[in-house]
Amino acid sequence: MMNGQASWVSGTAEDLVVDARELGVQASPRMITDYVEVGLLAPPQYRKTTQRGSDQRVFPPEQRRLFYELCRAKQRSTLPRVPHRTIIPVVLYMWLTDDTVIPVEQASRALRTHALATGINAEARRRQSANQVIEQFAHPSATMAQRLRVAQLIRSGEQTQRPDWNALADALAVLASPWRVEGPPEIVRGLGPPRMPITTDHVIAMWEARWAVTQKLRTESVPAAKLLTARTAARQSWAEYWVDRPALMREAGNLAHIFDIPDDQEQLARQHVTGYLTVLGDVLGELRPAFERAALRMHARS
């Protein structure tokens, strides 16, 4: 596993299986292959040390250690079986924040797995997701019927994989601003600090753009150069946000919690991945059309 106590060494798939079993984790060569296919590991590297034939392909030291840490993470989980999709965000978080472990080819596969898992939830999870949205955006005077309408549209969109963005935008706008009446001037409630208020139409536009990105990632049709361009932009955006965050929290008042940084590593990873997908949507030209459609919806209501 390690050369002394200082560094990791390269290893074959069989070596990785031994590493896992020494931790008490059941593993097999097929498991290693699965990890490569879904993007949890990069493909092993070709190695030729003889004139005829070649040795077994090997995983470089950083990938071997990655596999070891993923096995440890599975051990810490309270789930009897840990689906790949639940640990993919951790791998993507590493790629977003570090250049030394995850190659872009592996990140592309991991993004595909993440995209394919989007919306694949049990009914209980879909209800939970809907309730979280309602809790965040509902005005205290919103009626039960208005809340149920939003919940139904969110659950249906996830279940059918065909969200009705127009209907959801209208329902969410009513939920957040139940006093709204047709005709100008329309007064819409915004969330967040005064200098960057977020309306429900803005939120729908970002959801819609990320959804379009998800469809492209499912088929690995996004070029590596675009993935890397978006990563650079996402890093810059995150750095700027980190500087602005204290002031934004002060300005947000009782909504300062929307700028909280998760204590849980998995939730932090998911937050970074979500932010990256939004930036990728901009790089791929999906964000501007989504906001233009949002503006048209707002105009149609007034």
Image (spheres, rainbow, N blue to C red):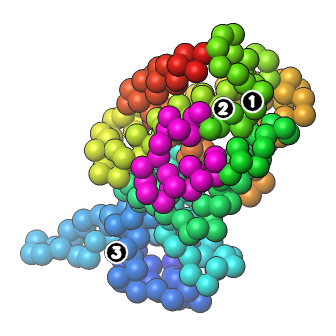
Q: Residue under label 2, please give it.
A: 173
Report x, y in % for residue 209. Answer: 46, 35
- Image mark for residue 177: 1
- Give whichever of discs 3 and 2 has the lower sequence position: 3
Left or right relative to 255: residue 51: left
Residue type at mark 2 is: Ala
- Measure the C-alpha gap from mark 3 to mark 2: 47 Å
Residues rendered magenta in the picture: 149-170
Q: Residues within 10 Å of mark 3 (few under 14, many from 20)?
A: some
Q: Nearer the viewer, residue 55 or 229?
A: 229
Q: Which SS class for mark 1?
A: loop
The quadrant of the image that shows the C terminus is: top right
Quarter where residue 73 is shown: bottom right
Pointer 2 and pointer 1: residues touching (CB < 8 Å)? yes
Report x, y in % for residue 24. Answer: 59, 89
Name the magenta segment's main secondary structure: helix
